[in-house]
Amino acid sequence: MKIGNFLEGKNIQVSERDESDFLTALKQGDRQAFARLVDETSTQIYRTARQILGDEQDAEDVLQETYMKALKALPTFEGRSSLSTWLHRIAVNEALMLIRKRKTPMVSVDDTQPFDSEEESTGMEIVDFCCLPENELLTSESRKFMDDAIQRLPENLKTVFVLRDLEGMSIQETSEVMQITENNVKTRLLRARLRLRQELAEYYAEKVEKEKSK
């Protein structure tokens, strides 16, 4: 585990000795070390929770709960995954529990079923975006629609999409956070992308027609 790997946007060279001392300090309850951990990871953890939950206050609650649980569990942290992956796993679990408490669970997608992109895309509308000016694709309205479309995904698809496509985690890291197989990560990701593509196609179809009629 390299501490430099989980520092968001920072290229810090950390020696093996410094890394070991930092982890030892964390496990021994050193408040300064824990404050450093929070400072260096909280932005990404909050952003992940915000993208999954779609609500700033809920994300704040998850962030607080994540570090409270991490503080209690650090003495038994075995280092089988990076600190970042471990914290994300706690945050994702907290976010999903919050979702399930507040609404009726959505019907989950069966990850054991083979993914057939041709079959699953049957009936989807294909829209050519060439007729739209580039600035039309980047408007705040369009970004808001995309954010809302992500929130409408079933929670199992949305979480994988957030971790992999928005947070940039690898398939392996996403698998570790979600505690599912890498094949299931790939299947959920493909299904999430397909659903979002369909929603965007329908959204931009109206804009294309308006542009053509000008």
Image: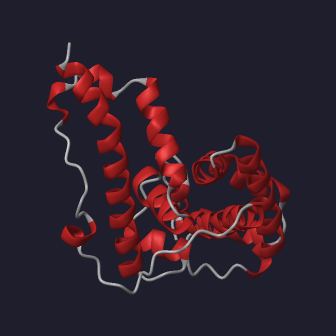
One can see residue 44 in this view: yes
Report x, y in % for residue 212.
17, 21
Q: Which quadrant would residue 121 be assigned to in this image?
A: bottom left
- Residue ID at (22%, 25%): 132
- Residue ID at (59%, 68%): 106
On the picture, is 158 further left or further right than 83?
left
Classify 50 as above or below 108: above
- Seen from the viewer's position, the closer of residues 95 and 132 is 132
On the picture, is 172 further left or further right than 72?
left
- Residue ID at (75%, 49%): 58
Classify 51 as above or below 185: above
Report x, y in % for residue 188.
40, 70
Report x, y in % for residue 107.
55, 73
Colouring mode (rainbow / by chain / secondary structure / one colour): secondary structure
Classify 30 as above or below 47: below
Report x, y in % for residue 7.
55, 52
Residue that lies at the very extreme toward the top in this rendered image: 214
- Seen from the viewer's position, the closer of residues 57 and 203 is 203
Q: How many marks?
A: 0
On the picture, is 97 further left or further right than 14?
right
Residue that lies at the very extreme toward the bottom in this rendered image: 112
- Seen from the viewer's position, the closer of residues 1 and 178 is 178
On the picture, is 35 further left or further right than 11?
right
One can see residue 10 in this view: no
Q: Which quadrant would residue 213 be assigned to in this image?
A: top left
**Considering the image in quadrants, where does the C terminus appear?**
top left
